[in-house]
């Protein structure tokens, strides 16, 4: 099943921030327990400071930058991010994302309720564990 870039894109204002161009990939089709979205923030655009807590639906979010430069504030820390960087916002972490570049900031954002999965039988999971143990 193919979904082309921009095929189902829409503008959405997140958490009191600026409008974000968003595409929710395979909405209503995938049975994975996560949302997979691409976001595009314009220069100066921002998500809006927020947290996902047990009270309003506990969620974890992973942000992966695919184009541009930004700044992510999370639990009082500030991180400059660029292409290839990834940030994990755990349940309850207060966070906000800003586009600090002259062009669009594009990301893949994966979010969902935390839960356990066992990928230990996959060779890539075994190598990922080894790499993290030696880092």
Image: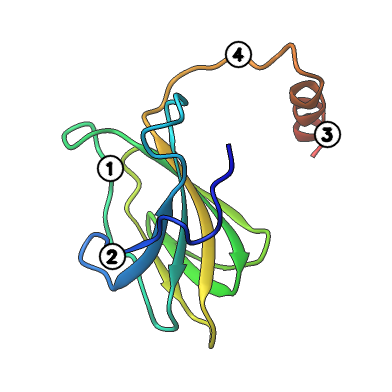
Q: Mark 3 points at which residue?
A: 134
The residue sitting at 35% across, 71% down in the picture is: 46
- If you read the primary sequence from the N terminus, does the residue marked by circle 1 or circle 4 appear first? 1
The residue sitting at 33% across, 65% down in the picture is: 47
- If you read the primary sequence from the N terminus, does the residue marked by circle 1 or circle 3 appear first? 1
Foreground of the two, 130 or 77? 130
Disc 4 to disc 2: CB gap under 8 Å: no
User: Relative to 67, is 62 above or below?
Assistant: above
Q: How crowded is mark 1: few (under 14 residues within 10 Å), some or many (20 or more)?
A: some
User: Distance of mark 1 from mark 3, alpha carbons?
Assistant: 32 Å
- Which element is circle 1 on? loop
The residue sitting at 35% across, 46% down in the picture is: 93
Query: Given the current orientation, which residue lies at the most extreme bottom position?
Result: 102
Answer with the quarter of the image where residue 131 lies. top right
Q: Residue 52 carries which label?
A: 1
Disc 1 to disc 4: CB gap under 8 Å: no
- Which element is circle 4 on? loop
């Amino acid at each position: 099943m193919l979904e082309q870039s921009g095929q189902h894109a829409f503008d959405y204002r997140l958490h009191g921030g600026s409008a974000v161009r968003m595409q929710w990939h395979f909405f209503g089709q995938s049975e994975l327990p996560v949302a997979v979205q691409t976001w595009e923030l314009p220069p100066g655009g921002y998500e809006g400071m927020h947290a996902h807590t047990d009270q309003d639906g506990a969620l974890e979010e992973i942000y992966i930058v695919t184009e541009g430069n930004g700044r992510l504030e999370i639990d009082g820390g500030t991180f400059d991010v660029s292409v290839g960087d990834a940030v994990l916002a755990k349940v309850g972490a207060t966070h906000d994302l800003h586009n600090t570049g002259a062009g669009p900031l594009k990301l893949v954002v994966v979010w969902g309720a935390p839960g356990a999965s066992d990928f230990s039988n996959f060779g890539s999971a075994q190598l990922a564990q080894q790499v993290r143990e030696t880092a």
